[in-house]
Amino acid sequence: MTTHLDFSARETASGVNSLFIERWSPRAFQPHVIEADVLTRIMDAARWSPSCFNAQPWRFYTSTAGTFDDFLNLLVEGNQAWAKDTSVIGFLIGQKHFEHNGKPNAYSAFDSGAAWMSLTMQARMEGLYTHGMGGIKAPEVADYLKLDTQKFEVIMGFTIGKLADLDSLSDEQRGNEVPNDRKALEQIWQQI
Ligand SMILES: Cc1cc2nc3c(=O)[nH]c(=O)nc-3n(C[C@H](O)[C@H](O)[C@H](O)COP(=O)(O)O)c2cc1C
């Protein structure tokens, strides 16, 4: 059993930056306090994402040491099992309407997802990992955050944390921590 990350399932075109290939969604995290300036950089990277009409519909709520357990309880049980060891749990919220004209923003979730990916890549550059989660108790999240659900929707949850030392894991746990594959490029891209 390997004690280092095995990216061999991830074949890429030559020259794709390793940042993209070596981003993945671990479940084995280790206790780690993310320094305030590191977390600020991660969140600020999200702020610079593009959005339709530059509306910036994304809102991020992240846990502190004092609220971590509350945030953890807002995940489905399967996610709680591994997310308990992460450093920060967050929820991504989308603003449903444009501020400039009040019309529905069909791109709110799309733009918010792009912002989450920016956050994710800055986290990678800080030596940290994110893990996205659809498995959250969305109505409870909205209540906890006191969201006006006419204006905002809960899109997803995520964690930010430091990968566990693979040597510290059991063989079974280590076997689960293997970056997965993708569809072939030809399946998702055609030049016509
Ligand atoms: C919106 C979204 C929701 C996801 N929901 C969950 C989840 O609830 N639980 C989980 O363990 N992983 C979840 N994932 C992680 C995906 O399974 C993972 O990103 C996908 O299998 C690709 O693997 P990789 O991120 O390791 O490259 C989610 C990812 C995204 C982007």
Image (spheres, helix red, strand yellow):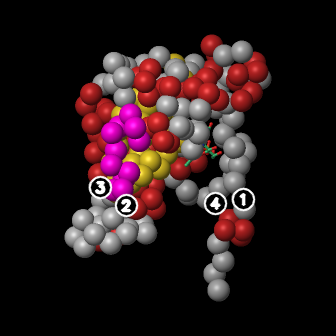
Q: Which residue was labeled with disc 1?
A: 183
Kindly identify the amino acid type of the residue bearing the numbered disc 3: Trp
Report whether 98 appears left or right of 142: left
Q: Quadrant of residue 88?
A: top left
Q: Residue 96 bears which disc, if any? A: 2
**Residue bearing the label numbered 3:** 48
Q: Nearer the viewer, mark 3 or mark 4?
A: 3
Name the residue: 59% across, 32% down: 76
Where on the image, by quarter, is ligand 1? top right
The reply to whether dot 2 and dot 3 touch (C-beta < 8 Å) is no
* Residue 5 location (% of width, % of height): 64, 32
Residue type for callout 4: Ala
Distance from Cα at disc 2 to Cα at disc 1: 32 Å
Packing grade of label 3 (10 A; few <14, some 14-19, many >=20) is few
Give yes or no for residue 146 being in the magenta stretch.
yes
Do the residues under discs 1 and 3 have CB atoms within 8 angstroms?
no
Give the quarter of the figure containing the N terminus: top right
Q: Secondary structure at mark 2?
A: loop
Q: Amino acid at mark 1?
A: Lys
**In the image, 86: left or right of 5?**
left
Q: Which residues are magenta?
A: 142-152
Q: Height in image: 28 above or below 123? A: above
The image's mark for residue 62 is none
Of helix, strand and loop, which one carries label 1?
loop
Q: x and y percent of residue 154 in the render?
A: 44, 48
